[in-house]
Image: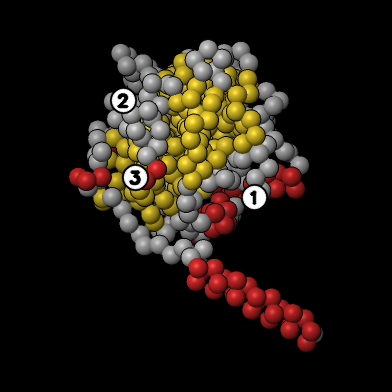
Amino acid sequence: MLSQAVLVAAVAAACYGVYHFSNTIGLVGNYYNHRPGICRRVPGIEHGSEDIHVTSDGKAFVSSGFLKSREMKEYAEKHKVKGRVFLFDFKKPSAGAVELGLKAGRDFDAKKFRPHGLSVLEDKKRGEHLVYVVSHPDGLPDVVEKFRFSPKSRQLIHVRSIPVGDKLVFTNDLALISEDQFYITNMAVFHFAPLAFLEKYLPLRTGAVFFYNGTEMQEVIPNLSLPNGVFLSSDHKMLYVVSFCDKTLMVYRLDPITKGAQLLQTVQLFGRGDNVQLTQSGDALLLGAHPNFLQFRIHEHSPTPADINSPSSVVRLPLDKDNLVREADVTEMFYDHGDLISGSSVAAIFEGQMLIGSVVDSLVHCELFTQAKS
């Protein structure tokens, strides 16, 4: 018993020594909350706002109810959490987020719908946008669900389900080029639990970006480490891809004919980047990020995630005239210890306002100060 106690004490002392040394040389970060304006939670969203896509007229489509851990699935069953898509109108922020109805088609089961990344192809004349959503249906392979948005009925009318195929095991986000043509990230390839665990923590580079041409998936960017969010430049010539494990944002030039990609820039991030969005002006990217990865994992896998805070961060990455990131001008717009929002996954700006989404927590709306509106 004495020897065990001595061993425990020695391990504890060693751990404290490592922590103290890391803190001394700056490896352990301590941050103060800072916000670009007045920020409040949007009522009605409690189980995630994982991805956001904003249209040119200020309509924000928000995915909610994404669950992947065993603990969260048990939580969902207990609390009857379902997959949803919300609509937030930046021009009517006081109305909050409105849940959109899901009008099922022949091959769509709303009860199994688990939305993740989404992308919108605008119909600027009628407002009947096409909304594509990555879904992880319970007990089934991943799929991309295609909907048509009805502005009159506030419904997403299911059009078709697009299977991702055998090569894509855990898809995350997609970026539309045109109808039924998009880039999509595949984060992981292993089903076997120990290997799946290693993929999350080691740079195994088993992930990839694929291009869907309307009939089949084509791998265009291989050997990536947990590729996460993906977004296109306003002219569709550049593709921005976030590597969650490497803590980088990569900028690729796209070939308009082959749809292949050439790496032009790798930007180091100071946190695990999640989803990336282009501002309405097209001159900057916004990135939702996790400053403390370990705390995020604890939060995400907790049976009651609302009880475990995880820090949240929003980073602004300005772009130059060639749509490359001006690295010297990158700034953090928002940081929160997790009291207001935990596990930030995405952010979007429209006319002096910002929405911040989360993996399994709330949605936050900010009224930006003048100097932060651009």
- Looking at the picture, tell me which residue is in the foreground, 155 or 5: 5
Mark with earlier residue (3, 1): 1
Residue 329 — which label? 3
- Looking at the picture, tell me which residue is in the foreground, 118 or 8: 8
Quadrant containing the C terminus in the rendered view: top left
Q: Which residue is denoted by mark 2 in the rendering?
A: 56
Measure how far apart labels 3 and 2 are at the Cα level. Answer: 26 Å
Measure how far apart labels 2 and 1 are at the Cα level. Answer: 38 Å
Mark with earlier residue (3, 2): 2
Q: Which residue is denoted by mark 1 in the rendering?
A: 201
Tell me which amino acid carries mark 3: Asp
Residue name at image x 24 percent, y 41 percent = 373
Measure how far apart labels 3 and 1 are at the Cα level. Answer: 29 Å
In the displayed structure image, the side of residue 189 where residue 333 appears, left or right: left
**Which is closer to the viewer, label 3 or label 1?**
3
Tell me which amino acid carries mark 1: Tyr
Q: Secondary structure at mark 2?
A: loop
Specify how the rendered protein is coloured. secondary structure
At which x and y percent is residue 300? 56, 51
In the displayed structure image, the side of residue 340 where residue 268 appears, left or right: right
Q: Secondary structure at mark 1?
A: helix
Q: Are marks 3 and 1 in contact (CB under 8 Å)?
A: no
**Which is closer to the viewer, label 2 or label 1?**
1
Residue name at image x 26 percent, y 50 percent = 37
From what the image shows, is residue 50 above or below residue 124?
below
- Looking at the picture, tell me which residue is in the foreground, 276 or 344: 276
Residue 63 — which label? none
From what the image shows, is residue 337 above or below residue 155?
below
Residue name at image x 60 percent, y 71 percent = 18
At which x and y percent is residue 113? 56, 31
**Which is closer to the viewer, label 3 or label 2?**
3
